[in-house]
Image (cartoon, rainbow, N blue to C red):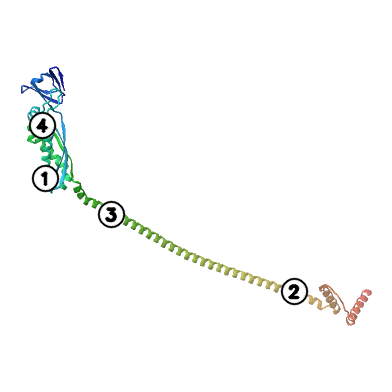
């Protein structure tokens, strides 16, 4: 920063700027962060930035197989020898406002870009495009970081390269599409294959489900058949058991009837035998009775059997003997 005070000038610089104060062609002051008064009519001042500076680059080149590619990178540098650089490039500043009289920084950027392009182009020219796209960033960064700091032109300028790297190596859009086509087709093929596999798996699962359902239906049909057969056997066994039970019941009923009939027959036989015996005894009793007594008993028996007598006819033949018997019995009683 330069300030004017009448016919004098005062300069005050930052610590990152190296000042060269010339008087009559000779360096009278040199250093960083200087502040001094000077007479502008007999002095000149050069200001060189000595802090690390970055310079990006972007350029196109051709690969070994004549394919156009674009390289992009960054170079970090600093001024190692300000007086040497000031002897090669004009860093003089205006003594009124401190601005550069020329464009030394743009010239310096052009030199660095040209050297970086030269080294990068040498590598591109001997490397196939596929290798460049796969490994170009790493290999170019290594080559540029190794060769650029050792380039004699930079030493002659008093510059020191702090770092150099390549951030991207890319083909043209057409070439990129062409290179992506096989990969894209491969991905599409893999996608189609995956879709086919999913569909095949779905069909296989559907077939397995149908086979499982068919097997279940067959198993259910077999179980139903076995159940029907078992129910038939159970029904047949039940009918057989019922028939056997009915047969046993019938046999038991027949046996009971037979026993009942036998018992009734035996009872009737015994009753008849008893009746016959009683009748024989009664006959034996009546056998010795006189005829008139027997006749009277017969009449008594007959009267006990009859419920009602509407008419009674007595013939003379019957009445005569009866009266005779009555009279006889009466005489017998009188004699007694």
76 versus 268 height, above or below: above
Give whichever of discs 1 and 4 has the lower sequence position: 1
Q: Disc 1 vs disc 2: which is toward the camera? A: 1
* Disc 3/disc 2 C-alpha distance (Å): 119 Å
**Dividing the image into 4 quarters, which one contains the N terminus?**
top left
**Dividing the image into 4 quarters, which one contains the C terminus?**
bottom right
Residue under pointer 3? 192
332 versus 20 height, above or below: below
Give whichever of discs 3 and 2 has the lower sequence position: 3
Q: Disc 2 vs disc 4: which is toward the camera? A: 4
Residue under pointer 1? 125
Give whichever of discs 1 and 3 has the lower sequence position: 1
Residue under pointer 4? 159
* Disc 1/disc 2 C-alpha distance (Å): 156 Å
Element under disc 4: strand
Q: Position of residue 20 (x, y in %)?
A: 10, 24
Residue under pointer 2? 275
Q: Residue at x 79, y 77 (%)?
A: 283
* Disc 2/disc 4 C-alpha distance (Å): 168 Å
The residue closer to the viewer here, 230 or 126, is 126
């Amino acid at each position: 920063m330069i300030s004017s005070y009448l016919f004098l000038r005062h300069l005050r610089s930052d610590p990152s700027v190296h000042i060269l104060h010339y008087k009559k062609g000779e360096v009278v002051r040199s250093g960083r962060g200087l502040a001094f008064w000077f007479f502008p009519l007999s002095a000149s001042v050069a200001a060189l930035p000595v802090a690390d500076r970055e310079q990006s680059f972007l350029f196109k080149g051709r690969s070994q197989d004549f394919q156009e590619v674009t390289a992009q990178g960054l170079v970090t540098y600093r001024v190692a020898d300000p007086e040497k650089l000031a002897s090669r490039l004009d860093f003089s500043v205006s003594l009124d406002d401190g601005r550069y009289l020329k464009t030394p920084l743009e010239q310096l950027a052009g030199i660095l870009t040209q050297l970086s392009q030269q080294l990068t182009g040498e590598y591109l020219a001997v490397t196939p495009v596929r290798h460049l796209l796969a490994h170009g960033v790493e290999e170019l960064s290594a080559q540029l970081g190794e060769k650029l700091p050792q380039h004699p032109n930079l030493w002659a300028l008093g510059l020191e390269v702090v770092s150099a790297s390549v951030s991207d190596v890319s083909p043209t859009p057409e070439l990129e599409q062409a290179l992506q086509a096989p990969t894209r087709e491969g991905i599409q093929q893999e996608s189609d294959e995956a879709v086919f596999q999913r569909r095949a798996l779905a069909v296989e699962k559907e077939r397995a489900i149908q086979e499982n359902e068919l097997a279940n239906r067959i198993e259910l049909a077999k179980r139903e058949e076995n159940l029907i057969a078992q129910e038939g056997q159970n029904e047949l066994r039940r009918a057989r058991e019922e028939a056997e039970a009915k047969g046993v019941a019938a046999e038991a009923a027949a046996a009971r009837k037979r026993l009942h009939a036998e018992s009734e027959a035996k009872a009737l036989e015994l009753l008849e035998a008893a009746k016959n015996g009683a009748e024989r005894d009664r006959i034996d009793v009546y056998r010795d009775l006189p005829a008139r007594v027997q006749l009277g008993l017969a009449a008594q028996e007959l009267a006990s059997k009859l419920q009602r007598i509407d008419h009674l006819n007595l013939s003379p033949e019957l009445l005569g003997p009866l009266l005779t018997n009555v009279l006889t019995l009466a005489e017998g009683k009188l004699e007694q």
